[in-house]
Amino acid sequence: MGAKHKKANADVVHAKKKTQVINPFETAKPQTARKLNPFDVHVNKKKFEILGRICKHDRGMPGVSRAKAQQRRSQTLGKQFEVKHKTNKFVDNRIGRHLSGDQLTDSVLNARYLADKLSQVRTSSKAEKFNLNDDELLTHRGQTLEEIEQYRDERSDDEDDERLDAEFTAATHFGGDGDAPQDRQAAIEDMITEQKRRKNEIAKEKDEVYDLTERLDANYKELISLVGQTSKEQMREKPPMDSYDRAIKEMTFDRRGTVTDKLIKPEDLAKQEAARLEKLENERLRRMNADGEEETSNVQPKHRSADDLDDSYFVAGLDDEDTTLAYDQDGKLCTHSNFDGESGTNKRDKEVNDSDDDIEEEEKDDSDDSSESDVDNLSDLKESDSDSEQELLPQTPKEKKPQKSNEPASLDTSIPFTIKMPKTYDNFTQLLNKRSVEQQATIVERIMKCNHPKLEGVNRENVIKLYAFLLQYIHELFEDASEDEISEHFQLLSLLVPLMYDLTHLNPERMSNTLLDVIKEKYSTYSKHPKMYPTLDTLVYFKLVSNIYSTSDFRHPLATPTYIFMQDILSHAHVRTRQDISMGILLVTIALEFGQRSKRLLPAVFNYLQGIVHMCIPKQPDEVLEITPPFERNGPFSKLLAIGCSAESKAIEQMPLQATDLVTHTLSLDFKVRVLSATLGLIKDATELVGEHVGATYLATPFLSLLSRLPIESYPAYVNENLNACKNALEQVATRPMKPLAPAEKKPKALRMLEPRFEAVYDDKRRPKMTKEKEERAKLLQKIKREKKGAIREIRRDTVYLQELRIKKQLQSDNERKEKVKRIYQEAAIQQGELNELARANKRKKF
């Protein structure tokens, strides 16, 4: 029984040992506790006791310290390691943060500015509490430092030194005397007041000294003229000036630069332009209603003396050519110049009208000169000096100036200068109907200036409406244009394109969406009949896109769909008439403009040019040449542009394609020659455009076989020159060796940089005897060395901790990857088993 009892006790003891805590430091009390576990305290024993040496690590708890350091690293380095290479989200807490750029008004900006200033005042209030200087605007003789041109001050910098006197030091330092106030706050306030008083006195003394110095300098300058007088003999004895003195004297008398005029904001420019047009409109209405004649008729005659001999009787109304008194056939008094049969009053009225025309011409000349000098700055908004002088001076007849033939359209007096935005499209067309090309462009320009978005907020929608009206007007012009009108329409388009460019930049997003909707509508119309070329207005819209928007972008919301649209037309539309050929060549020209900067190619362009050359080759009935659709290999349309050898074809003069070709359907001999000449030039341009591409050889080779079959003897000499130039460009690209394919060069990956290892070097040399200063320096160096060792040790531990975190992260990712691979293999095995089962079932069914 005793043995069994002992065995049971042993089992209990063994079980207690098993259930005890594994980590002995988990139950350890902090170092600041009153009772410490003696088994956790580590004691460093010293063999020898050295007087004067303090040992900080004789007792301690390394386990607890290590656990605290580990926890501290997990809270600092661990957190930083978790958020490494991760970006946070910034929250905008400003006033009106949800408003866009147009919705930010002045009140919101002022509120935001005041809130920022208040936050700055709150943060700097503590710093201003001990500021001895007054935060006031510093001036000198009524002027701030920014307004003073010269910052020269000959006063010495030693005057600014302010030292505390011995009385103040004895009273405030080292405990002070017995009579000083015991309150510290009162003492500080007294000190601040005294310092401000002393500073004011010193500043007053400095100002008095500065005033006396300036007065003395002024008196001295007055005496220089008296002292510097010398005799002629002394002047002759002076040596001549050298190049340096001469340059200094020239620089002294050089004219100084003046400040240029301030740049005008776009809002002010728009307002000035609107005011100028309104003024011109008022003058035009006054001239139209003859308001000026009433003013001249109401002028009271000047006082005339009784002795007046009427010497100046004819001065006011006649020229100075010939003032000889005479009588006409009716017996009326007149001059020698009025013997042409006109009465004096009629002649005078005619001359007054001529003088008015001269004044109008001078106004046109002045505005024209100003517009030529400052085109980009819109300086024609400014009133000319001649207009203001004419208003001040009396209206006297002037010599006539020769009229300019190129009168600017912007000053056409038959058009109102201020035009309101038409409400409907019919009203807009009524303004432009029965007007010349220049007048129509002038009307559109004045509508833009009078309805500029900077003038009123409502004008934003008016500008968009004007842009839509212009697109609709261009559609009506080119949809059913005739041969007589097509050239005039293209002239109007060339004048409207700069205006539409300016309109687009007023509101790019809305304008681009409007034009994009038009392109989409045209594409939907074309998709119903893809074998036919669209109307001419669609091609005009393509030209607008190439002139207004950037076509070199990799992806553009408007240029890219247009580029694809042109590809579809050139790839699917059949070529049957003269109009189809002209439209195709126009599309090719626009496509080359699209890829001029980006060097981007359109495959349908090269196919179309090959088809044009193919149609110029005469073929036998049984002869077939390979060509890609939409062109035909044989039949009447395969040799649509072929000509026979005749003297008439060789005598055709060189002419480019005309605008009338776009609306004409019948083919002519001169058109066939002009088409081949233009096609050869386009082939050369397209080859040079894609010459740098890798596959340019495959694009240039098919042209050589087609060009060699052309009957060049049937064409004029200039076509032969174009053909030779085109062949040379094609042969250079076709014979160019191609580079072998090679993978792209990759930059070698840099090796991962690790933390450097710091190794401490211990030296056991005895220190020699040193002086007191050197001994103190040696002690400081020893302390620095000890702190450095501690810092290195902490760096090592931090590096080890970070490496452990990286290893744990890597192991975790590896384990996740292994689990995924196992899952994939498991699913694959299940799938393979099911396939095998299906295979076995199929075999059993066969038997």
Image (spheres, grey):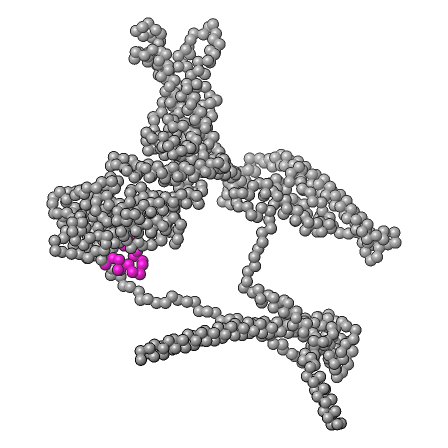
Task: Please tell me which residue lies in front, 165 or 38.
Answer: 38
In the rendered image, the quadrant that contains the N terminus is bottom right
Q: Quadrant of residue 287?
A: top left
- Image quadrant where one finds the C terminus: bottom left
Residue 94 shown left or right of residue 246 in the figure: right
Q: x%, y% of residue 411?
A: 39, 29
User: At 25% across and 52% down in the image, what residue appears?
Assistant: 608
Judge left or right: residue 335 versus residue 262.
Answer: left
Q: How many marks?
A: 0
Which region shows up in magenta? 685-701
Residue in the image at 39% along x and 54% along y: 554
Q: Is residue 59 visible?
A: yes
Estimate the x, y position of residue 543 in percent, counting from the top left.
33, 44
Depth order, front residue of 395/236: 395
Q: Is residue 397 magenta?
A: no
In this rendering, the answer to whether 492 lies above or below 618 is above
Q: Main secondary structure of the magenta part?
A: helix
Above or below, comparing residue 342 to residue 560 in the picture: above
- Residue sitting nearer the eye, 67 or 245: 67
**Residue 154 at x, y percent in the picture:** 65, 45
Residue at image position (31%, 78%) is 846
**What residue sits 42% from the left and 43% below the top?**
511
In magenta stretch: residue 699: yes
**Which quadrant of the view contains residue 478?**
top left
Does residue 373 show up?
A: no
In the picture, residue 64 is in which quadrant? bottom right
* Residue 727 x %, y %: 22, 54
